[in-house]
Image (cartoon, rainbow, N blue to C red):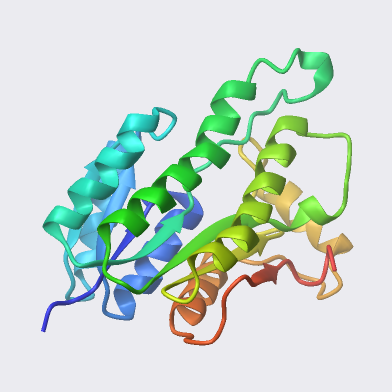
Amino acid sequence: MTRRTALITGGAIRVGRAIALALAEQGYNIALHYNRSSHEAVQTAEEIKKFGVSAKLYQANLAEPQQCKALVERVCKENDLTILVNSAAIFPENDSILDGLGDWDEVMSLNLRAPLLLAEAFVANTPISGHIINVLDARINRPAGDHLVYRLSKSGLWHLTESLALDLAPNIQVNGVALGAIMPPPGADQDHFERMSEKIPLGRTGSPKLVGEAVTFLVGQEFITGAVLPIDGGEFS
């Protein structure tokens, strides 16, 4: 029997890594995408193999449209791809209209256009059924003045998740996970992260492992599509 494969974009580090490990533990072979994190990708692949599954590495700059299509085509040629997890994203520190919107092209290309192009290639190259999981941000439900372009990109991805679920039904199920305080933001220390629990109804922060568990839950369901599962401790409900 051919073992199913999950493609995890941005799978070498942070949340993507946790998702890759969680799916590997459930018996999926992993196609691990990375861009610049080659050293971390090799380390994550070795951890994945401890679960008795394969881990193949795929480098691509997903901000380049042609590389999105080429990535999926290569993975499908070498594996039985049934799951696509769009985890790769960027989170610019200086991201407001006062900063000149200089990161617009890069953020929109990677955070929004790439998941759409990857989904398009996934549908064109996979069997008649499968799962797409998009990693979203729970804070999008609560407008604020920070990280303008990032918020726009994730808002668009949220809408794309719900729209693709209808467009691709009944063969492809499309769902999302909306993250709250899961890891310290880039550049923030652990103390800052722990203080975030004061605003969370459950009184504690989350972890990447919880995200991995949520993704494995969604890909195990046959009657859920168009859903966005909040993993935020109730902070943005």
Pinpoint residue 46: horizontal percent, then vertical percent.
21, 59
Q: How many marks?
A: 0
Direction from residue 20 to residue 133 in the image, left or right: right
Q: Quadrant of the C terminus?
A: bottom right
165 shown above or below 58: below
The answer to whether residue 234 is seen in the rendering is yes
Direction from residue 103 to residue 218 in the image, left or right: left
Residue for point 66% across, 15% down: 102
Q: Quadrant of the N terminus?
A: bottom left
Pinpoint residue 84: horizontal percent, then vertical percent.
39, 60
Observer-nearest residue: 78 or 119? 119
26 shown above or below 53: below
Observer-nearest residue: 193 or 138? 138
Q: Quadrant of residue 19?
A: bottom left
Pinpoint residue 18: horizontal percent, then vertical percent.
44, 63
Residue for point 55% across, 25% down: 106
Residue for point 50% across, 56% down: 15
Pinpoint residue 49: horizontal percent, then vertical percent.
19, 67
Direction from residue 19 to residue 4 in the image, left or right: left
Residue for point 89% across, 41% down: 144
